[in-house]
Amino acid sequence: MDIAIETIWDLGYAQASIGQIAKRAGISKGVVTYHFSSKDELMQNIVVDLYMKGASFLSKIENESTPSSMLKCYIETNLEFIHAHKEQVAAVAEIVMNVRDEEGKLFFHKPGDNAIYEPLIEILQWGQEDGSFRTFTSTGTRVLAMTIRSAIDLASQQLVTNPDFDITEYSKELIQLFESTTRQTHS
Amino acid sequence: MDIAIETIWDLGYAQASIGQIAKRAGISKGVVTYHFSSKDELMQNIVVDLYMKGASFLSKIENESTPSSMLKCYIETNLEFIHAHKEQVAAVAEIVMNVRDEEGKLFFHKPGDNAIYEPLIEILQWGQEDGSFRTFTSTGTRVLAMTIRSAIDLASQQLVTNPDFDITEYSKELIQLFESTTRQTHS
Amino acid sequence: MDIAIETIWDLGYAQASIGQIAKRAGISKGVVTYHFSSKDELMQNIVVDLYMKGASFLSKIENESTPSSMLKCYIETNLEFIHAHKEQVAAVAEIVMNVRDEEGKLFFHKPGDNAIYEPLIEILQWGQEDGSFRTFTSTGTRVLAMTIRSAIDLASQQLVTNPDFDITEYSKELIQLFESTTRQTHS
Amino acid sequence: MDIAIETIWDLGYAQASIGQIAKRAGISKGVVTYHFSSKDELMQNIVVDLYMKGASFLSKIENESTPSSMLKCYIETNLEFIHAHKEQVAAVAEIVMNVRDEEGKLFFHKPGDNAIYEPLIEILQWGQEDGSFRTFTSTGTRVLAMTIRSAIDLASQQLVTNPDFDITEYSKELIQLFESTTRQTHS
DNA sequence: GATGAATGAGATTTCATTCAT
DNA sequence: TATGAATGAAATCTCATTCAT
């Protein structure tokens, strides 16, 4: 699986054939289909593995005691995770966007599933309820969550394409940006 | 080319073979390779065509007379463009992320090329210089530009994956969000 | 298709891979899948082609004016057909017994379909009705038809496995056997 | 071996891979190749086992004291055997027609080997000699034996493909048919 | 005896590309 | 311009067989 991730990182999903992966791993093609009944299953394993790592890594966010610190922790921890697993994060992004079922529909996408934004929405709602964040409309809250999330995900793309990208600095700036965006402006 | 775009939209880049495209267009495979010397060239044409459409469509942004109205126009016009050409925008996103050269490097990416953020950075700098926007550090300005851009690009993904996504509403909310983010808070 | 038939005749269905067939035909594998979208489709074409040839070849049986001469003609013409197309007949026998659908069911077999015996049963019934054949029970008539048919089909197997088999002689003997089997024994 | 027979019965020879057989048996592939040095050897064992069962089961035919009762017993006992071991009989039919040597020749077939017809020919000759059967030419005797045998073997095919096939009834009808075929018509 | 990992050959199929017509 | 035949490379997958444990 690690070699598969590396191969996707280096060559992209389409070029990451079982043959390529096996060659880079120094094993025969048969080994791959012996352990994973199909290429798709290998890819699913890579995705599921990252989700499990992510769930563990990101669980500490829930421990924060204020909306502000939790938002900070959310951004920071997510970017740390992306940094720590940049190859796998990028590989999963490619897999999710390329694996399709027989009908041509994206395999890793339930239509209308925006569950990824829920944790952020909850943080933002909490902050509005306890008065530490300024208020947004319902839609505004959701759009802000989407904006934060897309800014986070951008980091993974930058790590792939931009060798000068400094994710630590990016993290600090994002935290500051969204801290000021959410801050209550008048007492 | 339009059929090629539709095919990528429906089936994804990998399944959009010349055979598929030709079949959907009701022509023979030979016609495609007659007009485009290779599949990659067809794909490049789709990308270049979108860039040209975009340059024309987005040129009106430069006519705005204030940083604030220009930022609003930038967001609004970009989202209108994504909306008007959602299939081609999505197709180009797939092409850009899948076409690679012999070495496995992404064909449509010059390393370190973040030119896409420059127009936004310029708007943000102009606003800081004329005092209509609050001030950001140099890095903060760049990160804000990246955040705005990624929020805009998210719309294209949502159009692909989320049938309930309302891009007009999204546009209004984004404008409001970044208007308030950049607004000078104390006179 | 002719080369495919020859290959099945020589090597059997399992060994008659697209690669083998292409090699024997002196063409590339791609040509086969270009003309036939899959191996199964090639095999179906071979089967359908033989059925069409058979329908044409055997149509003259209907012209006979007495049950006895029609039975004789049925046996004779069927064996002539098997003789004239022995390779394809044998190939179709292999195909019919080996091609299966995804569930493992034989593709060329509708459960309970014994339509092949109907023409013979009709001849035998006609002969009983007009008094030229001795009488059989309903089941006896069907079993006799099955016996005649299996004796005919045996010829194809013999042509495959027995180089000394004389199908002309076999034809004469079968005709005589079933002529005497069906003959009215007392006036 | 029983599982292998079931697998061939259910899926056909080609799909009856060692992996499939082992999976259905709940054992590892290795066990199969531990007990049988090759797949072909497993298949040979299934064939030989059936022949031994058959030799035992059918030996009682020799005890009959008249040609007529022996012919009846031959048909009846063979069909009982096919009925009692229908899966294995069908499996052996598939094996015999699919296993080939390196040259592509059928493994279970010695060219010109028509030994299977000898017992029937002997019964028919005996009946002609003792005057209880009507007389046939030498070739006619052989063709009649082939006809009887093919009618018997048809039962196995019918058991595979026709769920409504009643082999007991078929047995009675065949016995009656060939009793009347062989009966001396004038004293 | 039994297992599971590993292999390598070969099967089907897809596909970009070339080329004669 | 357009077509369709042909090619050859490569991809996924299956499978009999080997082997260390």
Image (spheres, coloured by chain):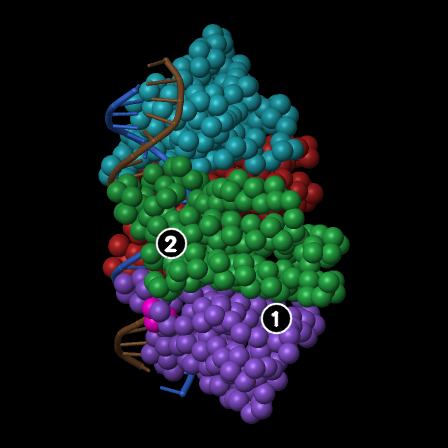
Chain colours: A red, B cyan, C green, D purple, E blue, F brown
Q: Position of residue A149 (x, y in %)?
A: 52, 40
User: What is the three-letter code of the residue carrying label 1?
Assistant: Thr
User: Between A86 and D44, which is closer to the camera in this rendering?
Assistant: D44
Q: Secondary structure at mark 1?
A: helix
Where is residue B80 drawn, in percent x and y? Answer: 55, 19
Q: Is residue A107 above or below residue A51?
A: above
Q: Are marks 1 and 2 in contact (CB under 8 Å)?
A: no
Residue in the image at 28% along x and 65% along y: D102
Q: Are marks 1 and 2 on the same chain?
A: no
Q: Which residues are magenta?
A: D107-111
Quarter of the figure with the C terminus of chain D? bottom right
Q: Nearer the viewer, residue B132 or D37?
A: D37
Determine the residue positioned at 74% across, 53% down.
Answer: C130
Image point (28%, 47%), residue name: C24
Report which residue position mark 2 lands on: C8
- Measure how far apart labels 1 and 2 are at the Cα level: 38 Å
Residue D109 on the magenta segment: yes
Is residue D177 highlighted in magenta? no
Secondary structure predominantly adopted by residues drawn in magenta: loop
Label 1 marks which chain's residue? D
| Residue lying at 27% horizontally and 47% vertically, measured from the top left | C23
Disc number for residue D181: 1
Quarter assignment of residue C105: bottom right
Three-letter residue code for mark 2: Ile
Which percent across, then down, holds residue C55? 55, 42
Taking the image as drawn, is residue A146 in sight?
Answer: yes
